[in-house]
Image (spheres, rainbow, N blue to C red):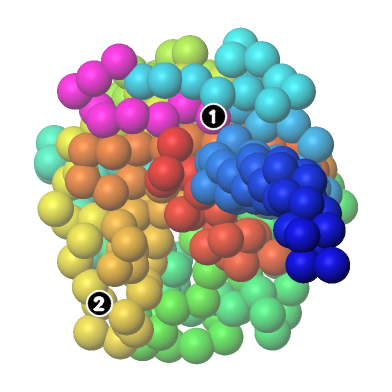
Amino acid sequence: MMGGGGQSGGKFLPVLLSLLLILFAYAAILLSGAFDPRQRLKVFMARHGLTSVSIVYGDRDEIPRTLTIDSDPARIYPYYSLSKPITAAMVMELADRRILSLDEGVAGTSPRNLMHHAGGWDRSITGDPVTQRQTDDRCVDIPPPPKQFKPGTRQAYSNIGYCILGALVERRTGMSFDAAARKLIPATRDMRYDDWLGPAGGWSGTAMTYWRFAARPTDPRIMEKPPYAGAAYYGLGWKVSRNGLSHFGLFKANYAIVLKRGKHVVVALFDGNPGDGQRALEEARPILMAL
């Protein structure tokens, strides 16, 4: 009987080894997918209802790389609130040229406060006078509404503040906002512009075009932390945190992300709306930065 049992075990051992090899191979495939940024990106997109993406990433002193899913590198996407860093860059350039001051009075506050989202308007209380309006007026022509808090005392994300900045740019330069942008910020010459969202969110273009803007050296004034701000705060045009600079744009059926850490810049433009733009950005950040 012992001899018979030994023969049976000898026949079973190769089969067991084959099964183990198959299991190990399958586990390796699963693990490789779990750590592959492209696969992780597809899972992220499916979870948030995002149907296409065009991505450009790389260090500013190198040739950037592209990645697309159901899209094309030449595809035009709306940047929406990724337009705000462009507006802030224009205002800082005009300040450098002494055409305006970051601390002069405008609409009962200052350009610095407006760029910090500390101009006094809180859309969580009164709604958004820019995105919720029913008129075709230009963003820069919207009259400043009543404030909800004392300017320069706290931050509340504000589209109207950037429309007011755009109006200031027009008055000081004597040009339309987009004409002034194309003169001051060369990257905007390859972008499209819509007056309705204007300086708050009116630019659109390819991921590569925005990458060229975002890859500019970081102005140190962007990083200055207001005394009332928390650990993560809005600098001059950008969100600042321990992970670097970022911004997202979200409206209707499109979502845009820009991430900047040191010389490394990632721009991702999506079809679809994840609902909570900041939460989706934080989920996407490690995936995009691992590309």
> Could you say which disc has been placed on residue 140 in the image?
none
Provide the residue designation for mark 2. 226
Residue 68 falls in image quadrant? top right
Provide the residue designation for mark 1. 55
Q: In which quarter of the image is the N terminus?
A: bottom right
Q: Indicate whether residue 240 is drawn in magenta.
A: no
Q: Give the residue drawn at x 42%, y 44%.
A: 290
Residue 174, percent from left and from top: 38, 29
Tell me if label 1 and label 2 are in contact, CB under 8 Å.
Answer: no
Would you say residue 133 is visible in this rendering? no
Q: Which of 195 and 26 is in front in this view?
A: 26
88 is higher (above) or lower (below) than 150: above
Q: The magenta stretch spans which residues? A: 55-63
Residue 99, percent from left and from top: 20, 40
Q: Give the residue drawn at x 30%, y 57%.
A: 244
Label 1 crowd bin: few (<14), some (14–19), many (20+), radius 10 Å: many
Q: Distance between the residues labelled 1 and 2?
A: 32 Å
**Does 274 sit left or right of 290 as displayed?**
right
Q: Give the residue drawn at x 78%, y 46%.
A: 11
Residue 245, percent from left and from top: 34, 54
Would you say residue 237 is visible in this rendering? yes
Residue 169 falls in image quadrant? top left
Q: Nearer the viewer, residue 103 or 190?
A: 190
Residue 217, percent from left and from top: 18, 36
230 is higher (above) or lower (below) than 23: below
Q: In which quarter of the image is the C terminus?
A: top left
**Does 215 sit left or right of 205 as displayed?**
left
Q: Could you tell which of marks 1 and 2 lies nearer the N-terminus?
A: 1
Q: Nearer the viewer, residue 234 or 10?
A: 10
Q: As shown in the figure, which amino acid type bears the numbered disc 2?
A: Pro
Q: Give the residue drawn at x 67%, y 47%.
A: 17
